[in-house]
Image: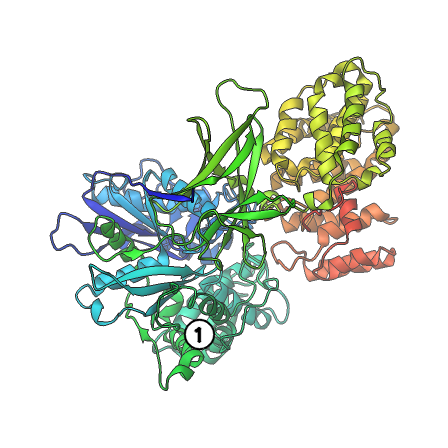
Amino acid sequence: MPASVAHHSSEQTPSRFVIGIDLGTTNSAVCFVDTQVEKWQVQTFSVPQLIAPGEIEARETLPSFSYIAAAHEFPVGSLNMPWDVNDRNDAVGVFAREQGKLVPGRVVESAKSWLCHSGVDRTSALLPWRASEDVPRRSPVEVSASFLAQMREAWNSANPEFPMEQQDVVVTLPASFDEVARELTVDAAKRAGIPRIMLVEEPQAAFYSWLHEHADRWQETVSPGQNILVCDIGGGTTDFTLIRVREHATQQVQFHRVAVGEHLILGGDNLDLALAHFLEPRLAQGKQLEPRQWGSLVRICRHAKEVLFSENAPESYVVTIPGSGTRLIGGALSVELTRDEAIGVLLEGFFPKVKLTDRPEKQRSGFQEFGLPYATDPAVTKYLASFLSTHLKSGLDLDEKGSDRPDIILFNGGAFLSPLIQERVLDVVCEWYSERGTGWAPIVLENPRHDLAVARGAAYYGMVRRNQGIRIAAGLPRTYYIGVGAESGELQALCLLPAGTEPGVTVQLPDHTFTLTVAAPVEFPLFHSSLRLTDPPGTLVPVEREQLTALPPIRTVLRFGKEKQATTLNVNLYASLTEIGTMQVWCREVDGPRIWQLQFDVRAATQTDQSGHSGAGESAGVLDEASVDQVRTLLKETFSPPFSQKPGGLAKRIAQMLDLSRDAWPPALLRQIWEILLEVESGRKKSGEHEGRWLNLLGFSLRPGYGVALDDWRVAETWKQLRGKLAYPGAANLNEWWILWRRVAGGLTGGQQQALANPLMTSFKEEMRRTRNTGKERKGSAGLEPLEPWRLLGSLERLPAGWKHELGEIAFWLLAQPERSALSPALIWTIGRLGARELMYGTLGDVVDVNVAAEWARKLLNERHPNENHFLAMMQLSRKTGDRYRDLSEADRVKIVKWMESHSAPERLIELVREVGEMAGETSAMIFGDSLPVGLQLRR
């Protein structure tokens, strides 16, 4: 039976108002329709916002900036809005934006860009980015929720009889947002008190706005066979969308959204950064500005760009920033930026004239300051060339005739407020296709309000859903696939939801049956493609990186009743695109009524160590089942009655049995050993020696805690089995305990790492307090110092930066005590890990403040007889990353390089302090503190 498709829908009681919200990177807006007005029009809702302490004014757009105030900065209550019950300690909107120019470290911006950043945990408190330790932080989801809450509360204050949460609300997002970013947007709305929303893509919303504004004459502009290109470049992202005009039986034409571009964090923010980089050498006399000055410069460059690229622009703009140190006023720095210079930097840098065959370069982005994964190539026109070349022809049905060039263009977003940028993009497109006809040029649709078009279009889309207005047929812009095994053992991709799938459609795959195990985790690799747009459901295709992009996996644990036995179950998969535009995947029991929903692995999409499982561990090879059975027999005879094998030298005996040194054991074998050890877990309680060997081998088999599918589940199971459950808590087994958690630290959550660190920190602080109060050192033999607790603490990269700072200070206090010299190697290694500029598995938000790292590096410079440990720690503290918020000053790094050279430090370590570079595998293993399984690499 072929794959089947079913439609479903959900009926909601119509509300009085339909509300459209543009949750923008730089500005947000709210528009609405009163459905009780017969000849309805989209109207703008002006949002009251703080202009200055105690001063409120309603404006059409809400700047997407959140300022976190210190308690003493403003009088109590002066930041309150009319609807606030409790006193506020923050501000959203105009005042936040203006304060950000003065105090950059307390303002949150570009929250939407962070919401789609897969390199950080988007649910953890990490904004403002690079703020000092005393500034409260919020997650990208919380910040987005604060903007939505401001709009909801403002609306409810003005319309108490029709609260926003009871109206139809449409929220816009970039067309290129992935499934996780869409889900997080829905979550942000729920946190803001808006439990039910609909989503619409911003380029579509901009076109809907045009349709509404030209409701009585849009038919005069479009005709069947035409392609409409929507170019939307806002403050943070660039979006391309292609809409095809087709004939329709019951109306003049129908619009079909046939393609969207790649996700590009490339927008107005990038232009601001480019101008700031251009001006910095002149302001700082060839040197680098302080981070505070740099933050001010970027925000001032945003205004300079808007002025110099506007109509009737002046010939120049004077850029002034505060001086360094305490010279904030008298030492102000100024430079004149001419209009020609700005055009040269921005127009030629971001919108160069290129050929239709040119493609973006794959290189590291030059912008590292704000932690966002900016597009690798700044040339917007190259991305546009790639998009049009790929999708113009693919948008045609097999029997369809029509244009293969963009006949109509709609420009939207803040970047296109500049006539210069519009003209440049138009000129480039004309050059690409002018050979098709002399004097050819696309029709440019009018868009007088770039700042309101998306919100207006969102409100109009809400009316379209009520069957009022012109609809754009817009299903999935990409084809989604699920990974399945083939007889050859190679992974293949099974088409799950084809491009073009409409909301409310369910796709079933009855021809493909999966055998799953009850009460054990299962993982489905997930892929999407913007190139393969015609594969029907159930099609099997090879996994080719050029055509398929890996997404966070789908995973579940099938459970029912009190079933705990490992039994198998046959299931079919089916998937649907919900009415609000998110994807759901389910599995149904073949011979029964039970159904399970498969969840997107949001953790895998928000934490660096789990983002996009690559299969590197599995690719390192597997052992034959006979060899694995030998290992299983040995482990069971060691840890199961009658305990016929002794635990001593267990790893050595396995290596001899396999004729393979333990460092060469592939990850697949290691994880099988972990599984067997969990099966015989009760046998570790036979004796202290049994428990010690069991702990040692368990940690070794699961290191580094990630890299193989389902490792996060394995670490969670290990935590559940072992947390606080040592049977023989003597010194030797405690040592093995600490080693185990150090080896798998990369798979532990932040909360688990804090649970491990907290009792150790409490003990160390109590000892330091007692010593300082009494003047007496702790008694005991220096040869029995516990090294492993410190090495564990250094491995916990997800500890809060404040904890790391405190631990580092304790470590230096211990280094200063001669009688604790046995601890020195572990302490120095730990200091390097705690203050590292480039983490091995943690996120950028976990990095210790640069001033702390610089202070620690200066302390290490006092060492007169450094060894390899000192050099390794110094390299980590002073390594050059290209990010001014992480890098030590040039002067500090020059001193450090001279110190390392004078003491004959390895050149490979010195070079990492001089220049941005990659570490060799040997250096990574030294930092990790153990050998790595073959085929696995730490992020570095």
Q: Residue at x 58, y 20 (%)?
A: 565
In the image, residue 111 above or below residue 405? above
Q: Nearer the viewer, residue 336 or 377?
A: 377
Q: Quadrant of residue 567?
A: top right
Q: Residues within 10 Å of mark 1 (few under 14, many from 20)?
A: some
Viewport quadrant of the N terminus = top left
The x, y position of residue 915, in whole percent, is 72, 62
Query: Looking at the image, which is closer to me, 876 or 468?
Result: 468
Residue lying at the far left in this picture: please name it.
38
User: Callout 1, which amino acid?
Assistant: Tyr
Q: Position of residue 157 (x, y in %)?
A: 24, 42
Judge by depth and name the residue closer to the eye, 346 or 499.
Answer: 499
| Residue at numbered disc 1 | 317
Identify the residue at the far front of this view. 1
Residue at the image position 62 percent from the left and 27 percent from the top: 717
Percent position of residue 436, x then y:
40, 82
Where disc 1 sits, the SS reads strand
User: Residue at left 31%, top 73%?
Assistant: 444
Percent across and percent down for residue 533 are 45, 57
Which residue is located at x 81 percent, y 27 percent?
777
Residue 665 visible within the image:
yes
Q: Nearer the viewer, residue 514 or 126?
A: 514
Residue 414, quarter of the rendered image? bottom left
Q: Left or right: where does residue 293 sit relative to residue 178?
A: right
Left of 423 or right of it: where is 625? right
Q: Up-down: is 585 above or below 40?
A: above
Q: Is residue 617 visible?
A: no
Considering every residue shown, the one lying at the far bottom of the view is: 438
Q: Is residue 311 left or right of residue 585?
A: left
Left or right, 823 with reference to 744 = right
Coloration mode: rainbow
